Image (cartoon, helix red, strand yellow):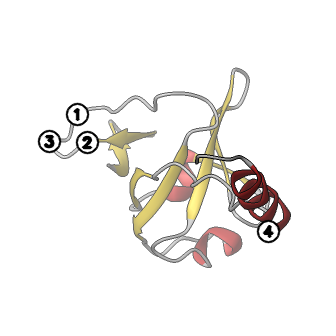
Amino acid sequence: MEVGWIGRATPALLGDRREIVCIPHQGCRLEIAATAATPHREVDLLVPGAVIRYKRSFLFGDRFELPSGATVRLGDLLGFKLQLAPTAPPPAPIEEDIVRRLMRRAATPGV
């Protein structure tokens, strides 16, 4: 997906065949695949691989939350290539839980 212009003054998210792309849901995580020069200071610091979060706003249009916590408009990301980010892996188990589980297995006969 790439952020580009539709008409003269409307930025939009475009697919591989230049079709308008719909973001699946609010809170969706998008990974930056390629960047472009932009006048926005915080957007200019983004690098490929960074993950931004989509925030829908009825009054202000589509917004994106940067890793720094700043919120930007779709127009601030012109020229950027985005892709859906993989879901976050589950947190690693706590060491005490692993030890407790092993102790239970050792205590039960026939296992």
For the point 45% across and 32% down, which residue is it? Answer: 23
In primary-sequence order, the first of circles 3 and 4 is 3
Identify the secondary structure beneath mark 4. helix
The answer to whether marks 2 and 1 mark residues whose Cβ atoms lie closer than 8 Å is: yes
- Read off the residue under disc 1: 19
- Disc 2 residue type? Gly
The answer to whether marks 2 and 3 mark residues whose Cβ atoms lie closer than 8 Å is: yes
Assess disc 2: are there few (<14), some (14-19) or many (≥20) residues with their C-alpha within 10 Å of its C-alpha: some
Q: Give the numbered dot on residue 17.
A: 3
Side of 13 relative to 103 (left or right): left
Please state the horizontal and vertical placement of residue 48, each as a whole percent of the image.
45, 74
The answer to whether marks 3 and 4 mark residues whose Cβ atoms lie closer than 8 Å is: no
The answer to whether marks 4 and 2 mark residues whose Cβ atoms lie closer than 8 Å is: no
Give the Cα separation between the discs numbered 1 and 4: 49 Å
Assess disc 4: are there few (<14), some (14-19) or many (≥20) residues with their C-alpha within 10 Å of its C-alpha: few
In primary-sequence order, the first of circles 4 and 2 is 2
Mark in front: 4 vs 2:
4
Identify the secondary structure beneath mark 2. loop
| Residue 18 in the image: above or below residue 85 | above
For the point 71% across and 60% down, which residue is it? Answer: 102
Give the Cα separation between the discs numbered 1 and 3: 6 Å
Assess disc 3: are there few (<14), some (14-19) or many (≥20) residues with their C-alpha within 10 Å of its C-alpha: few
- Read off the residue under disc 2: 15
Side of 17 relative to 11 (left or right): left
- Read off the residue under disc 4: 95
| Residue 40 in the image: above or below residue 63 | below
In primary-sequence order, the first of circles 1 and 4 is 1
- Disc 4 residue type? Glu
